[in-house]
Image (cartoon, helix red, strand yellow):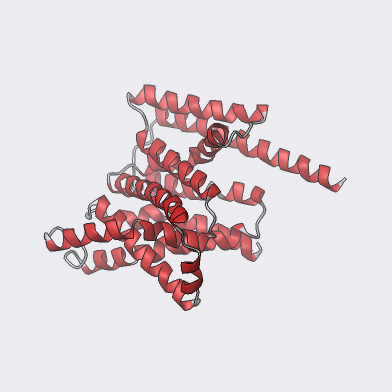
Amino acid sequence: MNKGALSAFLAYVCWGIFPVYFKLLHEVSPFQTMTHRVVWSFLFLLLILAVRKEIGIFRKELSLKRFLIYLGAGTLLAINWLTYVWAIAEGFVIESSLGYFINPLVSVLLGVIFLKERLRPAQWIPVGLAFIGVVYLTITFGSLPWIALVLAFSFGFYGLVKKIAPLGSLYGLTLETGAIFIPALIFLLVAEFSGTGAFGHSSLLITILLALTGIVTAIPLLLFSTGARSVPLTTIGLLQYIAPTLQFLSGVLLFNEPFTTTRLIGFSIIWLALVIFTIENLGERRRLSLAVNK
């Protein structure tokens, strides 16, 4: 495994074991955990820019238009993080993994709707199967799997915004966390002065874990950025299922969440959709590669 593939692999493994980390913060309110994640991520990213002596370059990249783009991206990221942290704390690790399983298909659908991209006929099959899987889970459980859908669509729209965003990954993540840094910091200060803040008022472990959320968030994103530049999209397409698979396994094996036959059927429909989606993409890229090399 080359360096780029290893970096991408480690990024997905980090994301896959996030439930274990955030489960340790279950006694902290999800909104506080999310805002700590924003604040510490921004400060950590600023530190990286300072070490690399790139703060001046970063400032030159700023403009009102770019700020508004990344404000949108940061808001979507905050929604995703808040939903994810709440789901982990409340024991919905399996359903949160479902959100990231269907995310690639949601991204394809958003591309069709907003970017006027056209699906190949065979690509409609996995999209349709994923829809059937969600409908099946909705009917059998009597309610929408809203956690999975919020995670999938918030991250899907985040990817859509990032597609038109002009900055690289490090500058982009710094700006999008910076755009929501002030509201997050104000919330934490209000919580601190009102006596409801967890930082420094819970156990030493909780305080350390909250402070480390910035590093925990930024490192896999930077690893992914390093890997994505040098790894073929086909490899990324396969590696992206590592994270939800590890999340799913942690929900079943570590946290003993119920996984009934009914859930198995619904998940299996969506897993089948992902298998078809991946095989079709690999086949299309191979066909294009052969056509170029002729």
Q: In this rendering, is residue 195 above or below 107?
A: below
Task: Give the residue displayed 30% in from the left and 64% down from the top.
Answer: 209
Task: Give the residue displayed 45% in from the left and 76% down from the top.
Answer: 50
Quadrant housing the N terminus:
bottom right
Q: Nearer the viewer, residue 16 or 160?
A: 160
Q: In this rendering, is residue 289 above or below 230?
A: above
The location of residue 52, given as percent across then percent down, is 50, 76
The number of callouts visible is 0
Q: Nearer the viewer, residue 197 or 255?
A: 197
Q: Residue furthest front?
A: 64
The location of residue 127, given as percent across then percent down, is 55, 29
Quadrant housing the C terminus:
top right
The location of residue 290, given as percent across then percent down, is 82, 44
Q: Residue furthest right?
A: 294
The location of residue 129, given as percent across then percent down, is 54, 27
Residue 120 visible, this orientation: yes
Q: Residue furthest top?
A: 139
Residue 109 is drawn in which quadrant?
A: top right
**Left or right: 90 as drawn, with respect to 226:** left
Residue 16 visible, this orientation: no
Q: Nearer the viewer, residue 89 or 175?
A: 175
